Amino acid sequence: MTLNQFIYKATRPLGGLQLARMLARHHPRILMYHRLSATDEPGKIHVDQFRKQMRLIKRHFHPMNLTELLEAHEQGNVPNHAVVVTFDDGYADFAEYAFPIMQEEGIPSTLFITTGFVNGDLWLWPDQLHYVIDEASIGGEPVYIDGMDKYVELLSDRDRAWNTIADYCLKIQNEKKESLISNLYHRLNVVRPSQAPVQYCGLKWSQIRKMVKSGLDVGSHSYSHPILTQLQDNELDKELKLSKLLIQKELNIETPLFCYPNGTPDDFNEKIKESISKAGYRYAVNAYPSRLPLSDTLSINRYPAVENMMLFEKTVFGTGYLFR
């Protein structure tokens, strides 16, 4: 048990969470979600747990969307106990589960959409990798992965195989990643769907337009969800500008918000931030927390949301912030 866990368990019955809430009142918590499910599925938060989390936020904090938080920050009047809920990518389950629950519980939200995904032009490369590994009918022998120059055991642990290959894909140029995935489909004799299978489907523009009318805040998550540092200059320019143009065309919104794909410190740099600014964005969010989340408006920090309520409480009440 870590010191942080010990403090949480020892002080929670004594009002430790409320004390942490008071001490962390000036620290806005921006939460990052991806997918929800009505069943227990790996990588997705159950809808019942998500509703509990939204009710906890409503009861103890000041919920707002990201645009509202940034406007308040610029005016120097960020409210105490501010919490922002954001979702990345634009999967169909956002409209099916997340947005209705947040509407019912009175929680504003910000959705970062991968516009080529929503436009039906593509489906996300991590899902393409999941699909080929899950659909492969193979023997017990390891599979040689072109580009990685190594064998990977798929049969015994497909999740581990996905993590190994996906981690490698994060570090290579976009065209090499596409070649690796294409070769993997060929080697495993799996037909690659041109459109996302139902379990990986994205939202439709019509759904997003309807949610925007009901108060949804929208930002860009690029056009195709590449690792921006692995792009050539012309590819980067297309990803940033085309995504923004599609949002303007389809939603009539001139969004100033951008979300870095993957969003770790290795996935963007000062050159990327300059390109984002030149493309017309004023703000960009990443995928890791810090003590001063709004100190750099082109690298705004977020907390990854988790299903475990103990970890979720530590994040939103501020114990993670206080003992970081």
Image: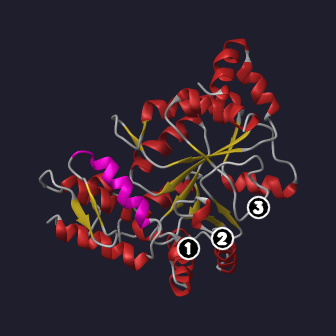
Mark 3 Cα-neighbour bin, 10 Å: few <14, some 14–19, many ≥20 = few
In the image shown, does 150 or 120 lie closer to the viewer?
150
Give the number of the disc on residue 269.
Answer: 2
Is there a contact, CB below 8 Å, between mark 1 and mark 2?
yes
Q: Is residue 236 visible?
A: yes
Relative placement, left or right, of 135 versus 24 is left
- Mark before the other along the chain sequence, 1 or 2: 1
Q: How far separated are the C-alphas under marks 3 and 1?
A: 19 Å
The reply to whether residue 124 is visible in this rendering is: no
Q: From the viewer's side, name the closer residue of 143 and 282.
A: 143
Q: Which of the labelled discs sits on residue 139, or is there none?
A: none
**Earlier-in-chain disc, 2 versus 3:** 2
Disc 3 marks a residue whose amino acid type is Asp
Query: Residue 118: image x %, image y %?
Result: 41, 65
As for residue 162 lying within the magenta part, the answer is: yes
Instruction: Please give the residue where the numbered disc 3 appears in the rendered image.
Output: 296
Residue stretch rendered in magenta on the structure: 156-169
